[in-house]
Image: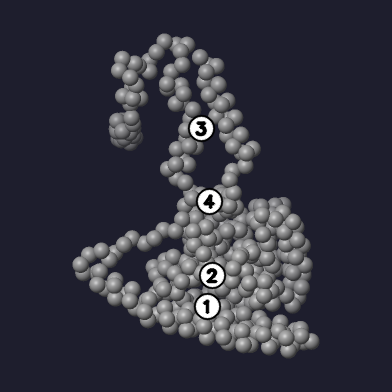
Amino acid sequence: MSGIEGKLSSSSSELDLDRPNIEDYLPSGSSIHEPRGKLRLRDLLDISPTLTEAAGAIVDDSFTRCFKSNPPEPWNWNVYLFPLWCFGVAIRYLVLFPVRVIVLTIGWILFLSSVIPVHFLLKGHDKLREKMERFLVELLCSFFVASWTGVVKYHGPRPSMRPKQVFVANHTSMIDFIILEQMTPFAVIMQKHPGWVGLIQSTILESVGCIWFNRSEAKDREIVAKKLRDHIQGVDNNPLLIFPEGTCVNNQYSVMFKKGAFELGCTVCPIAIKYNKIFVDAFWNSRKQSFTMHLLQLMTSWAVVCDVWYLEPQNLKPGETPIEFAERVRDIISVRAGLKKVPWDGYLKYSRPSPKHTERKQQSFAESVLRRLEEK
């Protein structure tokens, strides 16, 4: 015990030596040891909760880390490896990329030449038409995955079409949906996008029962909630897929799950998705990169390597709230995919802190300062 206490005392003394001395920053002749009753610099600095929170936000900004792409360490800047790196770039851009463009073009030609006749010629045969359209959407997604040289390993039983069940997964990029869709014709809940992606959403993906919403429209949330409840009741509807994080996260962290998928009164089937960053970072930062550029990044990489786990279905436990249920499912997905849980709402990425929250922080800071002054 005496040895341990000696180590602790020596380590604490070493820490004290590393700490800056406040007196070093005061004007010459000044001292923090002033007569009682006057305001001392140490009093203003000794606002522990505020300073601790501020220092923590600067040193460990876990919110920003969730949405940052971490490029790999450069390995090619020496005389031995640089020529090999140049050869690899030439292969990826001059050989693999043209081949992948051809593969994707063939996929689009086959899809469009089939889906248009199916959609118009089978109008009186709804079940057959829906079955064919599901197959064609799966086929198109398979061509997309092939255009990245996708190496995807699926673990667990393949999802089936059953009523009163919903699938939830962590979200890294829009390609999550493509990777899952090539195996199972999911009906996904997704944000509306502009451009050619929005055109595909409003035409092609409508055939598999996908539901679109706009984050800025409060009315959309009510409409979507009703559509969700109606969809899970249908026996012949495609399995419903939801990304409850509500935004793309960099596949290293897991942000809070929205409770909407967990208050439908149905079975929740977790899906964990983990990308191997050895060849490319699959994270899509939609604020810095368009989806077209994101696809070009994937198509000019060596490969997209991914693991998908279909995990054990979960149900709401007696006495458990939807928020607790969502956290329990997030735990399951995070453990399986090796993600770090953080207590953040992903929607904060799209909005500024509310004025009420700012005012509360300002009031708390002012009260802590006043308490110190009143003690004097």
Can you tell which mark lies on residue 360?
none
What is the count of numbered marks? 4
Question: CA separation, marks 3 and 4?
Answer: 20 Å
Q: Position of residue 158 (x, y in %)?
A: 60, 76
Q: Position of residue 100 (x, y in %)?
A: 45, 80
Q: Is residue 223 visible?
A: yes
Q: Position of residue 104 (x, y in %)?
A: 51, 81
Residue pictured at 55% horizontal, 67% vertical: 174
Q: Earlier in the sequence, mark 4 or mark 2?
A: 2
Q: Earlier in the sequence, mark 1 or mark 4?
A: 1
How dense is the environment of label 2, judged by Cα within 10 Å: few (below 14), some, or many (20 and up)?
A: some
User: Where 309 sits versus 223, above or below?
Assistant: below
Q: Which quadrant, please, contains the N terminus?
A: top left
Q: What amino acid is at disc 3?
A: Pro
Residue on which disc 1 sits: 144
Q: What amino acid is at disc 4?
A: Val
Question: CA separation, marks 1 and 4?
Answer: 32 Å
In front here: 163 or 229?
A: 229
Relative placement, left or right, of 23 versus 126 is left
Residue pictured at 74% horizontal, 72% vertical: 163
Question: CA separation, marks 1 and 3?
Answer: 51 Å
Q: Nearer the viewer, mark 1 or mark 3?
A: 1
Can you tell which mark lies on residue 175?
2
Disc 1, disc 2: CB below 8 Å? yes
Question: CA separation, marks 1 and 2?
Answer: 9 Å
In front here: 259 or 73?
A: 73
How dense is the environment of label 1, judged by Cα within 10 Å: few (below 14), some, or many (20 and up)?
A: many
